[in-house]
Amino acid sequence: MKKTASAAFGFSVLPSYLALGKPDGEGNVPPSQRINLACIGTAGRANSVIPSLCSGGHAQVVALADVDANNLNSQKNQERSPDAKKFKDFRVMLDKMGDDIDAVSVVTPDHTHYVATLAAMQLGKHVYVEKPLTHSYKEADNLMKAEEKYGVVTQMGNQGHTSTGSEQFKHLVDKGIIKDIVKIEAWKSPSLWFMKPEERKNGFPLKMSDVPGHVDWDLWCGPAPMEEFCKQYHPFGWRAFYLYGLGMLGDWGAHIIDFAHHWLDMRLPTKIDAITMEDHNQVIFPLVTRLGMHFPARGDKPPIDLTWHDGAGFEPDVNEKFWDSGSDGAKKKPNLGGAGTLLYQEDGDYVVHRNSHGSASRIYPRVEMMKYKDDIKVAGPELDHLQSFTQACMGNGKTSSPFSVAAPLTKVLTLGVVAQYLNENLEFDPETETFKGNAAANDLLSGPAPRKGWEGYYESV
């Protein structure tokens, strides 16, 4: 009868989610409530990013781009995006499918974040890009300018920035519980291969090998110099190399110092000290890094000295006055974990500790924390980091880590990497955004000159 009636009156019976314009009980969402998503990079971290962006049915993948054919044609991609068009080159994808794309995710090695992100923004596409935002200081600055120019929704993948932990940190700052911070210790345990003595390579350059048939090595290199292929570069080891990644500081620094940098309005450092660079060379990052950064006063906020330590011996010492006392009166050192920050006031009665990502902050000793027990627990955001991006693309709310927030943080990370690479103490002028009296360091602010065919992305935003 439905078919007969439909034929007689010249219309079709529509599914309820289309007819009523709202999600049905089976998870189907009308086109007006979802975005068309193109994904640049489809494996590794993308296996979490893509499903999260599409959660709730508010985004559908219409295009995939990956320089590795095995990644592009993986069973996961086939199952979750069977109708998506596939491309090797993201530039071809954007050229051919630009009219059908609303937003783009960029989950690639650090050295190609910038070109893929800017190309999408120049077409008016919203962009979600993994951390660190870019591979160089100038690239981060360019993307911040591009965000203002093109007016698109942006979000960097430091997912803890949209979390209960982030809301709590902001609340503690607003209430004056975290205030007058003068010293920050930040650390990360040795979790990547280049931070393990037995896995580091003693000879450079590394042993090269034939390019796998499923990898387009030219496209993988993108704007970076096209060196010979090494199996340690792809699919994941690239993060260890200055040429392609930002090491542990760029990888985890975006999660560890994010809250303090943003909510304490730390801005840019004026001094970066290369305290320890164990097994230093200019190919892979140090076995152990200790960096010092001095951030000047900002209005009524005092100067801050931040120390970053990754690798062996990472855990900072904690003054015994901040330890908890057991029932027997014995003092017990806080368990700080493998990643985090300690924030100190000058001559304060307590120290603020938090781990990384979206984790909450604690106050030591506990007796001091109990004074603020009503402020420690706060409500979290309604949406997570990726869902908030999808909704913002549809005009519902804003993202918490747009490029205006992510780029200044990324600039700090890249300044630290310059000090790692040169193994030198540096002075930086935030007004001119240049190093003082160090031409080699200033050259590194822009990174390597782009290869032929990629120059256009660096000429203007």
Image: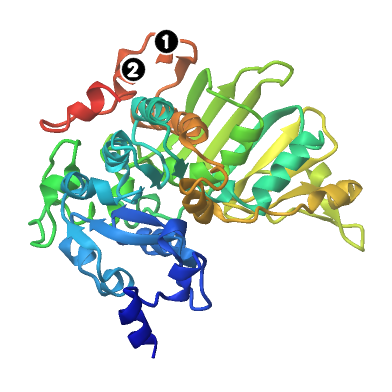
Q: Quadrant of the C terminus?
A: top left
- Residue 308 position, x and y percent, is 54, 37
Query: What secondary structure is marked by label 2?
Result: helix
- Residue 324 position, x and y percent, is 83, 53
Q: Residue furthest front?
A: 8
- Residue 318 position, x and y percent, is 72, 44
Tell me what residue is drawn at x 50 percent, y 42 percent.
253
Tell me what residue is drawn at x 30 percent, y 40 percent.
120
Tell me what residue is drawn at x 53 percent, y 22 percent.
269
Colour scheme shown: rainbow
What kind of residue is marked 1?
Lys
Residue, disc 1: 436
What kind of residue is marked 2?
Asn
Tell me what residue is drawn at x 47 percent, y 15 percent.
427
| Residue 440 visible, this angle | yes
Q: Residue furthest bottom?
A: 1
Against 397, residue 346 (above or below) is above
Residue 150 lies in what quarter of the image?
A: top left
